[in-house]
Amino acid sequence: MKISREVRVGLLVALCLFLLYFGFKFLKGVNIFNPIHSYTGKFVQLNGLTEQAPVYVRGYKVGLVEEIDYDYSRDTAFTIIVSLNSDIKVVEGSAMRLVPDGLLGGTAIEVIIPAGAELAEIPTKSVLPTSIQPTMIDELRGTMLASMDSLLQSVQELVDNVNGQLEGDRLKSILASADEMLVSLRKSSAKLEKTMNKDLPDIITQVESVLADVKKLSANASEADVAAVVAKAETTLANVNKLVDAANNPDGSVGKLLHDKSLYDNVNTTVQTADSLMQEIREQPNSLIWGKKKKKK
């Protein structure tokens, strides 16, 4: 059977169109041989989301952002359509979330599917609720703004305290106290300078004189005849020892006087007789001269 030229040209054009469509889908990352399910979500903003952005389920890529439509007359200006592999079962309670993708500021879609075998699967092309996850920059911006706000409050409190201290006559009082302190410091400095220039040399001279006297005294002490003094002291102690021995010796005169009781009694009797004689002389002195005694009344 002979095929006409027109049919062959038509088949060639159809093949080219198929290859063009397949290549376009392949470049977009869509596998045209696997069936897909589409779902819709509406967002207030997209944070740089583009078509062909990846779609994740629990961190695993399961599809692409197929289409983005926008209408700025509505609050939810952006409507996106995502394509998921047909083996992904999107059940009731699922939602879309706009999430950061990588460190270079990319954006992707995450489909949050709750776990539970008893949950019913929702039909394709359904509209899912949406949410936006803050980016790392947004979190840092919030943290920095909070820190800056706290810092500004602290600075404002400090300025208010300083202003409160400087209001009215307090500043004058502070300056007056500072002036008094400076005057006192000047006086103290002058006294110290006078002491250093005048009194300190006198003190040093006196100290040098005392040190010289101490040096002379030390020299005289070293030159003294210490041996002669010690010899004299030993001689004196020897004489004292001899005296003590003589007193303790009962045969010596001093020992007899100290140890002989009869001698002590005789001395005592003599003393008593002499005392009686002196008493009589005081009372009757004429009896010794004329031999007469005065009669006692």
Image (tube, rainbow, N blue to C red):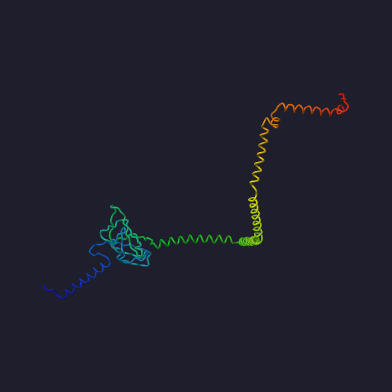
Which of the two residues, 100 or 80, is positioned nearer the viewer here?
100
Q: Is 10 situated above or below 40?
A: below
Q: Quadrant of the C terminus?
A: top right
Image coordinates of residue 77 in percent, x first then y, are 36, 65
Quarter residue 246 falls in: top right
Which of the two residues, 183 or 269, is positioned nearer the viewer here?
269
Image coordinates of residue 170 in percent, x first then y, are 61, 60
Which of the two residues, 43 or 268, is positioned nearer the viewer here?
268
Q: Is 118 situated above or below 296?
A: below
Q: Quadrant of the N terminus?
A: bottom left
Which of the two residues, 157 or 200, is positioned nearer the viewer here?
200
208 left or right, relative to 69: right
Image coordinates of residue 228 in percent, x first then y, are 65, 46
12 left or right, relative to 110: left
Given the current orientation, which residue lies at the most extreme bottom position? Answer: 5
Image coordinates of residue 4 in percent, x first then y, are 14, 75
Quarter residue 8 falls in: bottom left
Q: Is 134 situated above or below 1?
A: above
53 left or right, relative to 3: right
Quarter residue 267 falls in: top right
